[in-house]
Image (spheres, helix red, strand yellow):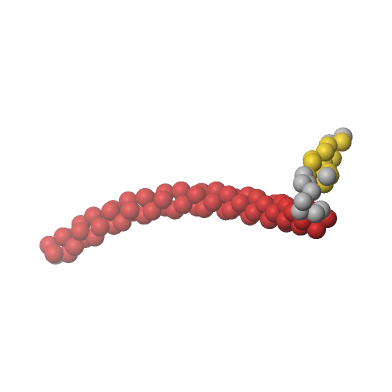
Amino acid sequence: MDSFRGAWFNHRLVMGYHRLAMGYHRLAMGYHRLAMGYHRLAMGYHRLATGYHRLATGYHRLAIKCMKTTHSPSKKSTIRQLSTNGTLFYRIS
């Protein structure tokens, strides 16, 4: 009977520590889920920015190609950025 009482108290003690550990674990998982949410949001913005950057790089390469093909190397050519009522367009001269 005495060994049973000792095992029962030992079990209660272990279960107390287990409940405490589970509480901390649930708290940690909550913070982890929050961090993952922010991370997914950041990755979404990053993918969007990468897409715009790739698009801009394509236009930039196209502009360089246009400069190389339409103008002789001896004549110095420049791309001027002009703006009329908010719309941007480029003129090669």
Quarter-of-image position of residue 81: top right
Residue 66 shows in the view: no
Quarter-of-image position of residue 88: top right
Residue 43's x, y, as percent? Answer: 58, 53
Quadrant where the C terminus sits is top right
> In the visual, does 3 lie left or right of 84?
left
Quadrant where the N terminus sits is bottom left
Residue 56 shows in the view: yes
> In the visual, does 81 lie left or right of 43?
right
Residue found at the far front of this picture: 74
Marks counted in the figure total: 0
Residue found at the far left of this picture: 2
The residue sitting at 79% across, 41% down in the picture is 80
Residue 42's x, y, as percent? Answer: 58, 49
Closest to the observer, 41 or 21? 41
The residue sitting at 77% across, 46% down in the picture is 76
Closest to the observer, 77 or 7? 77
5 in relation to 30, above or below: below
The residue sitting at 23% across, 55% down in the picture is 13
The residue sitting at 20% across, 59% down in the picture is 10
Closest to the observer, 32 or 20? 32
Closest to the observer, 90 or 85? 90
Residue found at the far top of this picture: 85
Residue 31's x, y, as percent? Answer: 46, 48
